Image (tube, grey):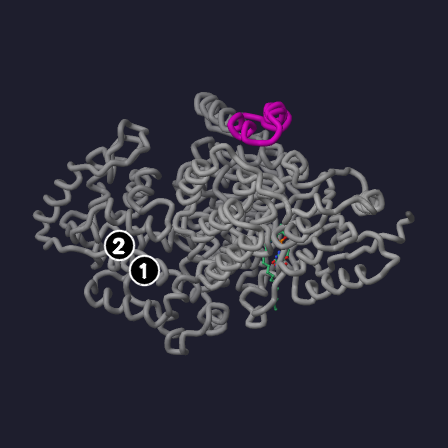
Amino acid sequence: MGAAAVAVIRLRNPPVNALSLTALQALEDGLKRADADPSVKAVMICGENGKFSAGADIRGFSSPKRHGIALGPIISLIEKSEKPVVAAIEGIALGGGLEVALGCHYRIAHVKARMGLPEVTIGLLPGAQGTQRLPRLIGVPAALDIITTGRHIPATEALKLGLVDEVVEENTVEAAIRLANKVIGQPLGPRRLSLKPVPKLPNMEAFLREALVKVKKQAHGCLAPELCFQAVKAATEQTFADGVRKEQELFNILLTSGQAQALQYAFFAERAVQKWTTPSGASWKSASPQPIHKAAVIGLGTMGRGIVTSLVKANIPVVALEQNLEYLNMGRKAVMLLLEREAMKMEQGAQTLRFHNPARLQFTVDFDVLQDVDLVIEAVFENMALKKEIFQKISRICKPGAFLCTNTSALNIDEIASATRCPQQVIGTHFFSPAHVMRLLEIIYGLHTSATAIATAMQLAKALKKVGVVVGNCFGFVGNRMMFPYVQQAVFLLEEGSRPEAIDQVLEDFGFKIGPFRMSDLAGLDVGWRSRKGQGLTGASLPPGTPARQRHGHRYSPLPDLLCENGRFGQKTGKGWYQYEKAGGRTAKPDPWLHNFLAQYRDTHHIKTRFIDQEEILERCLFPLMNEGFDILAEGIASGPEHLDVIYINGYGWPKHRGGPMFHASTIGLPRVLAKLQKYSEAHPDVPGLRPSAFLKKLVAMGNPPLKDWMSYLSRQSNKL
Ligand SMILES: CCCCCCCCCCCCC/C=C/C(=O)SCCNC(=O)CCNC(=O)[C@H](O)C(C)(C)COP(=O)(O)OP(=O)(O)OC[C@H]1O[C@@H](n2cnc3c(N)ncnc32)[C@H](O)[C@@H]1OP(=O)(O)O
């Protein structure tokens, strides 16, 4: 039989062949034409431009035109076809794209292709019969894993699981046409997944019970993983048709849940921040990144070690530098340990060999080795004088085009740059701990930072598999600046009568991975203490006679300082806001010592204890954080609310299914946020963080516009830069 007998249907909707209304219609028309044409003996479905399909067009889910549009019936049409249908999977087959492939009778994939059902990550489930077909094909445990995590699987794993019939290194489309020709005339019944039983497990009930516990534990309040689970469970209990009905019912619950909207917003927000701009007109469109052939990291403390590990993982040769041999050897050991662990997690354990290649990872105490690097990341102690000394030195030693990055969480980039001869090359790269794990990279431009430096830092973020967010220079930048009022309120709530465990619980129930007190114990209370001492808020430089609970006329809580004075630095000392089993222990237990201490503190300062309910805890912590966000936007420190949300989701454990703090403010409604801030501000007039931002007030006065329009209400003059 010649190749002409195989009809080719090509999914075409650049850049990722998403299944839009038009694409769905074209697919259906193509199938019907192939079916009606007697010269066609088989069908091959592939995607344009080496990509099968990224699934349904995500923007379509919020379109009013989506009602009545379904992919499931088209997939049934594929499966019922009396002519064999072969899917040629190149690049990606995700979501509805993979569901189309599951409806085909045969699947053939390129060795570099990736497959997955990532609907759970955008708050949905595979709603085109995928939850019913996949368990029939690869069994319940593997299907549950893929559907509830949304992870992408490589073609080689797909072959092992039986998800695809063949993996090829050559031209996939040609191989699929060959396969289609070969199977013409063969019975299709055994290839129709809807007719197959779900493979039995000896202990299905127990397996599902345990799986549900695991799914719930990892969901942190997100609905989609549990409903994905329910849909797969239905496949084990019901007929295919009933399972599909259940899948639809669950899909509709998710589609109309606010969580799906929040997660889809987060998906596009992450892509929007790639298209960075600055108030001075620099932008991703005109700036080109420079290649980084070799990088250096100065300082091998916790942050430096993580950054070196990240660079090595990204296959970028690194020079790791410390001030003396003792610190260098400690740093080297720690980095090697991290790399061993990372290598074990990676696919090929052989990666370890590459990590140990001295040509790619060099440890030194000699600054002159930095002469030929393209980029330096300074990751020393958070101390301005020290950083300036280092920048002065490296701007002399490094080649003229080298980019000089400082890993700082709050310090002034311009002041650091002023120590160099090349301020245009200086940029802030704020990594989050552990730096080889956390996805966020806050990229801070100073007054003189060049567009090329920003583009290069963004490119670096991508190479490190991180999400880079470009922000302006101010104390704490975006993330920490918004965090200050949040943590401050949490401590004020303790003064007024609450307990760390009560406050953490409310915020963890909201969806944060970890509440503010557990977080502070993990990070180390001494970090903030040092910073407050540096700012003259506590310690020896505090002018005598300063009231204990007031600084510069504003309310101040000395509680965190008092804990540090008692040697309670958090997990590292075994005691902080909680007690731990030992120094370095991780299991937080409420501490009666702290409860007594708080009671005495309130007595000393004549604070009347009151019961504080969950609503007040949540609002007092979250609303000032959002409020600061409005100020940040008004000052031009970030170019849109999406930036703030991406930062919070990827660096601060904000629950993604709530879309980020600014998205959350928009769903609560700005008038309500404003009214509550006004109420709390009246009750606590000495707390500036509770005073509503002028920009928030303006947006409310303009009728609470949707988040996407907020920035249009800012006049150019109000931008700081
Ligand atoms: C009018 C009504 C229309 C209705 C249409 C809906 C039909 C309804 C049928 C019901 C079906 C139910 C079940 C099916 C559900 C789904 O399939 S949900 C979608 C599942 N798929 C995904 O979640 C994949 C999401 N995409 C990605 O993970 C990545 O984008 C990628 C494909 C792995 C590519 O990554 P990368 O190379 O890094 O490029 P990006 O920058 O991420 O993407 C490039 C541009 O493409 C846009 N995009 C990507 N995927 C989609 C998508 N599925 N829908 C719409 N747009 C998508 C992305 O935003 C980028 O765009 P720009 O930012 O503009 O460049």
Classify 407 as above or below 41.
above
Quote the CA–CA distance across marks 2 and 1.
8 Å
User: What residue is disc 1 on?
Assistant: 624
Tag 1 or tag 2, which sits nearer the N-term?
A: 2
User: What residue is disc 2 on?
Assistant: 489
Instruction: Tell me which residue sits at (75%, 52%) in the image.
Output: 46
Disc 2 residue: CB within 8 Å of ligand 1 = no
Ligand 1: quadrant of the figure: bottom right
Q: Position of residue 375 (x, y in %)?
A: 59, 40
- Residue 164 sits in which quadrant? top right
Q: Nearer the viewer, residue 647 or 548?
A: 647
Q: Secondary structure at mark 1?
A: helix
Amino acid on which the number 1 mark rests in the picture: Pro
Q: Which residues are magenta?
A: 339-363
Q: Does the segment drawn in magenta span residue 345?
A: yes
Classify 10 Å Cα crowding around label 2: few (below 14), some (14-19), many (20 and above): many
Instruction: Tell me which residue sits at (37%, 54%) in the image.
Output: 481
Q: Nearer the viewer, residue 82 or 123?
A: 82
Q: Nearer the viewer, residue 34 or 10?
A: 34
Q: Position of residue 281 (x, y in %)?
A: 58, 64
Report if residue 669 is visible in the image.
yes
In the rendered view, does 599 fall on the left or right side of 613? left
